Image: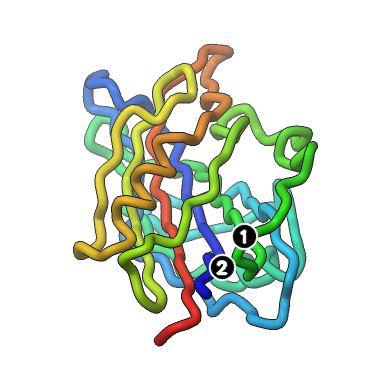
Amino acid sequence: MRSLCCLVVVFLAAGSLAAQGPTSPPRLVAAELGIAPWNVNSGGIAAFDVKIDATGSVQSADVVQDVAPYGGMLAEALPTWRFEPAREGGRAVPSRVLVLGFFRPPLTSFAAPDSPRYKSTTAPAELPWPTSVAVPPYPPNALGSGKVVLEADLSDRGAVTKTRILTPPSPFDSAAADTARQWQFRPASRGNRDVASRAFLVFSFVGTTP
């Protein structure tokens, strides 16, 4: 029996992906997470509105949506995350990111809620927010646990248009990339206009074998 324990998603909404002069969004450099608790049979989404400064350090993390005990686990880890800062005209500038964790209960199968909480959560307009999510299956050719970090481009309509895996090749890559392309978002907004954005997704798979 195998199970997927958690999926942590990092959404970067600090700039358009189109070539619009010297503006570039921040990029994730390093992200560490605590071990997901094994004695919890619940799941859900925990999300934070994270502000990063011009050096790429996390300055604050405000809760957008919480689910115990995963929200606390993310809140403890976020101050250690590092980014390459956003740039405007070649100059590093502060920015905001949405860090969202989707935590699946450690069960082989479970019934999805009829009205998932994320659909009624109001997130800051400057950040993208999911409107439809898919849960990645545990790959049949995989053993044990693994993490996949990928970069995803979001269109100004909230569709995932491109993904790029950033971690070394693993049996979990296809499941992570295929699932990411199924997600839909309310796009980020700037000046009352929907804009393209970039997302960094970290999928964490946990199996019952070492």
Point 26% across, 19% down: residue: 20
Q: Is residue 50 left or right of residue 52?
A: right
Q: Is residue 58 left or right of residue 164?
A: right
Q: Which residue is mark 2?
A: 5
Point 55% across, 63% down: residue: 6
What kind of element bears circle 2? strand
Give whichever of discs 1 and 2 has the lower sequence position.
2
Point 67% across, 55% down: residue: 46
Residue count near mark 1 (Cα–Cα under 10 Å), binned few <14, some 14–19, many ≥20: many
Q: Quadrant of the C terminus?
A: bottom left
What kind of element bears circle 1? strand
Quarter-of-image position of residue 90: top left
> Mark 1 to mark 2: distance in Å?
6 Å
Residue count near mark 2 (Cα–Cα under 10 Å), binned few <14, some 14–19, many ≥20: many
Point 43% across, 44% down: residue: 179
Quick check: marks 1 and 2 in contact, CB under 8 Å? yes
Looking at numbered disc 1 in the image, what kind of residue is underneath it? Phe
Q: Which residue is mark 1?
A: 103
- Say above or below: 162 vs 69: above
Q: Is residue 50 left or right of residue 161?
A: right
